[in-house]
Image: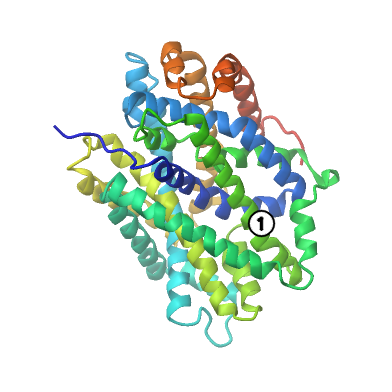
């Protein structure tokens, strides 16, 4: 009889869980959101929302996964048999499927930039980073090849399993990510005039804080922890029963907040030192920042370090998204794991091809006034993830067996065990109301500020 895989240690679980969110939240989304939402005031609210709302939701997913020892769909079926709650698992799978199909396009761009920076110069004579990015995303063969290469590496790692694949890769990539961050931060903080960037990032100016920025901070607190898509349900299903869920959640949250803080210190002082303003969207990562590092002494080295850092974080997120799909159909320890990794990986790649082409040959194709890539990102970030977060909060608040919740918390600190009633109240009432307000605002049905 095959036995279910487990993380070899609590550290492996924490690094993999933190890595799942860091690429998406702390490096891809966070700098862009800070740049458009008020700087330091936004960062302060983001920390508060992450601790008070994001972490309780993360613990909720941990409880679901660890209590059952099963991936998302089977976990809901076991806890609520004869109901439709297992569709929360399917929703998470669908969200991860769509997310990885266009996220792999971004991963492909980064991989391509990194290879170019290692084996030669990113820029050819007379070109600019604006031109480089435009040429990269609009070249259909190059964009698709880069996306395929990114998915190939993801498939190979996930196909090796939890211990040999995801955990081993996370143990290598996550420490490497923090080391590279430190190198960039040291360089950024030694630039002349960097103080303006530090003030922008760390000094709250509530006079410029809008209702939209507040909602962005709340949405970022969900996004940075990968809650709402049941990834953490699947990851926690491999966790030993003796481990503390709350301490693990605090560690994951701490690493994500730390990474966001480090990203800000690496990026904003350098931008302001060189007189550049934060850009929105991919332009910040693929145009502005390479141009910033190029102007430093040893610029080509720092560009390569930055791209390696971003690539590490992107892969750790991709691993988790493919894992939730593979785990749903793989047997314990899965002799079918490699086959399923290839099947799902290839399908995701095929679905992602139109997103890769949406900046070139399919640039004129739109959905609701957005490009195919932007429409998919909007659907995932503003619709599917909030719905998933809401359903998970309601499930643990109302449907999760009380005796099972008590049993899962027996190894937790005394103060937490005494706070279970308050925790359940938050999941039942406070968090759902907040999520609904955010969701209605995003859809334009409840405007709360410009």
Give the residue displayed 66% in from the left and 50% down from the top: 33
Above or below for 151 versus 227: below
Q: How packed is label 1: few (under 14 Cα within 10 Å), some, or many (20 or more)?
A: many
Identity of the residue furthest to the bottom in this view: 125
Give the residue displayed 61% in from the left and 51% down from the top: 260
Give the residue displayed 58% in from the left and 67% down from the top: 183
Colour convention of the picture: rainbow
In which quarter of the view is residue 41 placed? top right
Q: Would you say 152 lies left or right of 247 here?
A: left
Q: Would you say 329 lies left or right of 439 here?
A: left
Image position, residue 278 (x, y; %): 70, 61
Q: Could you say whether the residue bearing mark 1 is in a helix, strand or loop? A: helix
Image position, residue 13 (x, y; %): 41, 42
Image quadrant where one finds the N terminus? top left
Q: Nearer the viewer, residue 195 or 108?
A: 195
Q: Is residue 279 visible?
A: no
Q: Is residue 46 visible?
A: yes
Q: Would you say 397 lies left or right of 43 here?
A: left
Total of numbered circles in the picture?
1
Image position, residue 44 (x, y; %): 73, 43
Q: Nearer the viewer, residue 95 or 23?
A: 23
Q: Nearer the viewer, residue 160 or 39?
A: 160
Image position, residue 156 (x, y; %): 28, 56
In which quarter of the view is residue 88 placed? top left
In which quarter of the view is residue 240 placed? top left
Above or below for 432 versus 31: above
Above or below for 45 versus 171: above
Image quadrant where one finds the C terminus? top right
- Mark 1 lies on residue: 264
Q: Nearer the viewer, residue 184 or 74?
A: 184
């Amino acid at each position: 009889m095959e036995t279910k895989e487990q993380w070899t240690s609590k550290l492996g679980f924490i690094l993999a869980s933190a890595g799942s969110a860091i690429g998406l939240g702390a490096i891809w989304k966070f700098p862009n959101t800070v740049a458009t939402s008020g700087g330091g005031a936004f960062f302060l609210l983001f920390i508060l929302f992450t601790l008070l709302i994001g972490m309780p939701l993360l613990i909720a997913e941990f409880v679901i996964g660890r209590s059952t020892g099963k991936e998302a769909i089977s976990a809901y079926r076991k806890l609520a048999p004869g109901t439709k709650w297992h569709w929360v698992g399917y929703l998470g799978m669908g969200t991860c499927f769509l997310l990885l199909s266009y996220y792999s396009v971004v991963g492909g761009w980064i991989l391509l930039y990194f290879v170019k920076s290692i084996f030669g110069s990113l820029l050819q004579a007379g070109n600019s980073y604006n031109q480089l990015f435009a040429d990269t995303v609009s070249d259909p063969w190059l964009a698709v090849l880069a996306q395929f290469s990114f998915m190939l590496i993801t498939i190979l790692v996930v196909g090796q399993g939890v211990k040999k694949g995801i955990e081993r890769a996370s143990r290598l990539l996550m420490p490497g990510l923090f080391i590279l961050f430190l190198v960039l931060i040291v360089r950024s903080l030694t630039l002349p005039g960097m103080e303006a960037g530090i003030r922008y990032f760390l000094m709250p100016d509530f006079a410029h804080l809008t209702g939209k920025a507040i909602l962005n901070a709340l949405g970022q607190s969900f996004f940075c922890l990968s809650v709402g898509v049941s990834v953490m349900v699947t990851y926690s299903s491999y966790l030993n029963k003796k481990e503390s869920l709350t301490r693990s959640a605090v560690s994951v949250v701490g690493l994500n907040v730390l990474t966001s803080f480090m990203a800000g210190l690496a990026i904003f002082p350098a931008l302001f030192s060189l007189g550049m303003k934060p850009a929105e969207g991919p332009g910040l990562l693929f145009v502005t920042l390479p141009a910033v590092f190029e102007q430093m002494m040893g610029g080509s080295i720092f560009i390569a370090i930055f791209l390696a850092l971003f690539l590490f974080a992107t892969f750790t997120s991709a691993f988790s998204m493919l894992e939730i799909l593979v785990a749903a159909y793989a047997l314990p320890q899965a002799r079918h794991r490699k086959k399923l990794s290839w099947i799902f990986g290839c399908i995701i790649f095929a679905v992602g091809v139109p997103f890769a082409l949406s900046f070139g040959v399919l640039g004129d194709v739109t959905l609701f006034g957005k490009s195919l890539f932007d429409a998919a990102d909007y659907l995932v970030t503003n619709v599917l993830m909030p719905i998933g977060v809401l359903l998970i909060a309601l499930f643990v608040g109302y449907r999760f067996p009380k005796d099972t919740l008590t049993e899962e918390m027996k190894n937790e600190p005394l103060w937490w065990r005494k706070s279970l009633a308050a925790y359940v109240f938050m999941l039942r009432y406070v968090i759902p109301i907040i999520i609904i307000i955010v969701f209605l605002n995003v859809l334009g049905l409840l405007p709360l500020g410009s």
